[in-house]
Amino acid sequence: MERVHQIHHPEISEVLVYPTKELTVKSASQEIIELVKLNPLASITYATGDTMIPVYENLATAVDRGLVDFSQTTAFHLDEYYPYSQERKFSFVKFLNNYVFGPLKINPDNIHTLNGIAEDPHIEAKRYDDLVSKRISLALLGIVPRGHIGFNERNTPF
């Protein structure tokens, strides 16, 4: 394997940087698979975005080959536009239904999403925050060239 660089960060336990997209996808997929094998009841928060698609495709292939079983895991998503129905084209829930929840065969009872058309977004955010804050084994987050992680822009404290 090509050399992996480790970056030290005061708030993140480990940041590994791989020299190629392919190695990054392979490593991320393998880490997720190993977590689920060790803890079939793991709770995972899934990110959206094109950079995550190859990881999710690798995971779906592993599921199809019988190498891992996500059916008992609990799934969350990070965020949603408001007001935005999950049936709309760019809904994050729609994205995850297509790339994660369905392909990984996660039990629908174990899938938790934000209601993008909730009558009161503050109540919905509180409900979801309470749910997420008690259960996450792994949070998948995209890091983009501009330096933000999730929706946290560069220099924003966690």
Image (cartoon, rainbow, N blue to C red):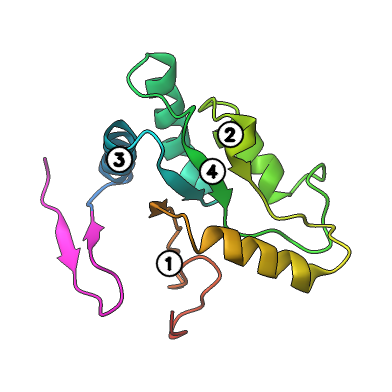
On the image, the x and y values in percent for residue 39 come to 32, 37
Q: Which residue is mark 1?
A: 145
Q: Amino acid at mark 3?
A: Leu
- Considering only order in the chain, which callout, 2 or 1, is on the residue closer to the N terminus? 2
On the image, the x and y values in percent for residue 110 come to 58, 38
Labels 1 & 3 near each other (Cβ < 8 A): no
Labels 1 & 4 near each other (Cβ < 8 A): no
- Residue visible at 51% across and 75% down? 152
Q: Is residue 142 visible?
A: yes
- Residue visible at 43% across and 73% down? 147
On the image, the x and y values in percent for residue 144 come to 45, 64
Q: Could you tell me which quadrant the N terminus lies in?
A: top left
Q: Classify 10 Å Cα crowding around label 4: few (below 14), some (14-19), many (20 and above).
A: many
Magenta region, residue range: 1-17
Labels 3 & 4 near each other (Cβ < 8 A): no
Q: CA distance from mark 1 to mark 4?
A: 27 Å
Q: Which residue is mark 4?
A: 75
Q: Classify 10 Å Cα crowding around label 1: few (below 14), some (14-19), many (20 and above).
A: few
Q: Secondary structure at mark 4?
A: strand
Q: Which residue is mark 3?
A: 35
Labels 4 & 2 near each other (Cβ < 8 A): yes
- Considering only order in the chain, which callout, 4 or 1, is on the residue closer to the N terminus? 4
Which quadrant holds residue 109? top right
Q: Amino acid at mark 1?
A: Pro
Q: Given this view, does label 1 or label 3 mark the residue nearer the observer?
A: 3
Q: Classify 10 Å Cα crowding around label 2: few (below 14), some (14-19), many (20 and above).
A: many
Q: Which residue is mark 2?
A: 101
Q: CA distance from mark 2 to mark 3?
A: 17 Å
